[in-house]
């Protein structure tokens, strides 16, 4: 029997996509979705994602959430994240990483050869390039490391979630800093929108 009451759903997401999850929730009126974020810097330490996700799942269960969804792709965990999610019967966003689901997983797979040589910039990375990439990798102190880290890339591809000229300027500046040709493609939120819209 349908009582008309929506389930309480917690999305446990990477901090890199927090703004996007909140924007989709607002656009679609998903007031029943509660967002909990794990630190964005786990992007640099994917071995931390699965253990942190398990702790967050246990906390969400203790908090009484009836459904939990992982706002992550595999994100470099080599299947470790999926092993944790399978243990608790929890689904996640399809795809290997956020660049793929923003682009659209199917289109990303079809263009995989070109994608392999692209350094991806999202809105998050455009906003936080210095704090999230330059300083943690030591590129401000050791500019010679740019060649080591980025020599195999052929271009910087900005996957834009929003039409924001200021973010485009920042993304292009990041590409110039890395010495890479710049390309911009507007993706919107890609496969993230239907993944969240399906939660009920």
Image: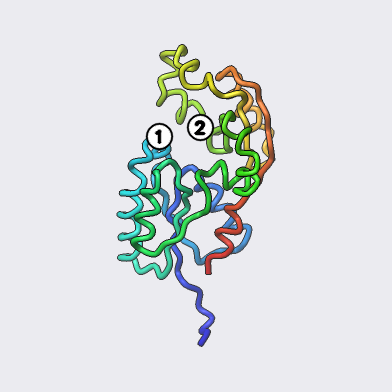
Q: Position of residue 51 (x, y in %)?
A: 31, 49
For the residue carrying disc 1, how many other residues have a C-alpha within 10 Å: few (<14), some (14-19), or many (20+)? some
Q: Secondary structure at mark 2?
A: loop
Image point 33% across, 42% down: which residue? 48
Asked whether 200 or 165 is in front, the reply is: 200
Residue 65, relative to residue 52: is it above or below? below
Pointers 2 and 1 in contact (C-beta within 8 Å): no
Asked if residue 196 can be seen in this view, the reply is yes
Asked whether 37 or 146 is in front, the reply is: 146
Asked whether 104 or 139 is in front, the reply is: 104
Q: Position of residue 105 (x, y in %)?
A: 60, 48
Position of residue 194 in the picture relative to residue 50 (left or right)? right
Q: How many numbered tags mark residues here?
A: 2
Residue 47, relative to residue 3: is it above or below? above
Q: CA distance from mark 2 to mark 1?
A: 14 Å
Instruction: Tell which tag, 2 or 1, sits nearer the viewer.
Output: 1
Image point 39% across, 67% down: which residue? 65
Question: In the picture, residue 165 is in which quadrant?
Answer: top right
Image point 47% across, 21% down: which residue? 149
Question: In the picture, residue 138 is in which quadrant?
Answer: top left
Image point 39% across, 64% down: which residue? 89
Q: Position of residue 42 (x, y in %)?
A: 39, 39
Residue 23, relative to residue 67: is it above or below? above
Query: Disc 2 marks which residue?
Result: 128
Residue 198, relative to residue 134: is it above or below? below
Single out the residue that lies furthest toward the bottom: 1
Colour setup of the view:
rainbow
Position of residue 191 in the picture relative to residue 14 (left or right)? right
Query: Disc 1 marks which residue?
Result: 44
Q: Secondary structure at mark 1?
A: helix
């Amino acid at each position: 029997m349908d009582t008309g009451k929506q389930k309480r759903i917690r999305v446990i997401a990477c901090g890199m996509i927090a703004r996007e999850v909140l924007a989709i929730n607002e656009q679609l009126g998903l007031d029943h979705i509660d967002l909990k974020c794990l630190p964005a810097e786990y992007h640099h330490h994917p071995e931390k994602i699965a253990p942190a996700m398990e702790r967050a799942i246990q906390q969400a269960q203790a908090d009484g959430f009836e459904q939990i969804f992982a706002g992550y792709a595999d994100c470099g965990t080599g299947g470790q994240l999926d092993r944790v999610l399978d243990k608790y019967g929890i689904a996640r966003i399809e795809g290997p990483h956020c660049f793929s689901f923003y682009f659209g997983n199917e289109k990303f797979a079809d263009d995989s050869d070109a994608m392999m040589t692209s350094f991806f910039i999202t809105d998050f990375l455009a906003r936080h390039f210095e704090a999230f990439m330059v300083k943690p990798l030591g590129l401000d102190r050791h500019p010679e490391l740019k060649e080591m880290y980025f020599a195999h890339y052929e271009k910087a591809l900005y996957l834009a979630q929003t039409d924001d000229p200021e973010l485009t300027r920042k993304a292009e500046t990041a590409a110039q800093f890395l010495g890479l040709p710049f390309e911009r493609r507007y993706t919107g939120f890609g496969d993230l929108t239907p993944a969240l819209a399906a939660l009920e």
